Image (cartoon, rainbow, N blue to C red):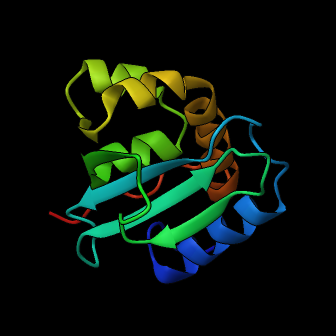
Amino acid sequence: MAAFLTEEWLDELARALEAAEPLAQGPRFGLGQLVTGAPGGDVAYTLLVGGGEPGELRRGLEAATVVLVEDYDTAAALVAGDPVADLLAAGRIKVRGDAAALVDAAELVAALGELLSLARGARRPPPAPR
């Protein structure tokens, strides 16, 4: 299994998204992730889901409807299955873009969380080096 947030890990996640059943029939939604302080530097990618199509991962944030900004440890908590709502309430995740679209896409976000956990084998990634 590839190390968290490396190019290999992103490739594995892209394959998992493409192989998964479409997550929703509603409009296409792009959930961007900007992870700061990762061991290899900041990482930005967008998960495109919905529209009755297979999921897709794109590098960068250009296709994002909403961007979640978090540090590496928070991203690791997300992948390990910590609820997005809890991390948002704790102020560990910042939201950029259309926050109402994020609320409307709550079901998609929850499904993405499950997919991320599967892609990581539900193991918490190691903490970022200090």
2 shown above or below 116? below
Q: Nearer the viewer, residue 83 or 29?
A: 29
Q: Position of residue 116 (x, y in %)?
A: 60, 50
Seen in the image, is 37 located left or right of residue 54? Answer: left
Seen in the image, is 10 located left or right of residue 68? Answer: right
Outermost residue to the left:
130
Q: Nearer the viewer, residue 123 or 36?
A: 36
119 shown above or below 79? below
Outermost residue to the front:
27
Q: Nearer the viewer, residue 126 or 12?
A: 12
Q: Identify the image quadrant of residue 90.
A: top left
Q: Is residue 76 visible?
A: yes
Q: Residue at x 77, y 37 (%)?
A: 25
Q: Is residue 127 visible?
A: no
Q: Position of residue 119 (x, y in %)?
A: 67, 57
Q: Residue at x 37, y 24 (%)?
A: 100
Instruction: Assign the N terminus to one quadrant of the image.
Output: bottom right
Q: Position of residue 30 (x, y in %)?
A: 50, 51
Instruction: Assign the C terminus to one quadrant of the image.
Output: bottom left
Seen in the image, is 34 located left or right of residue 25? Answer: left
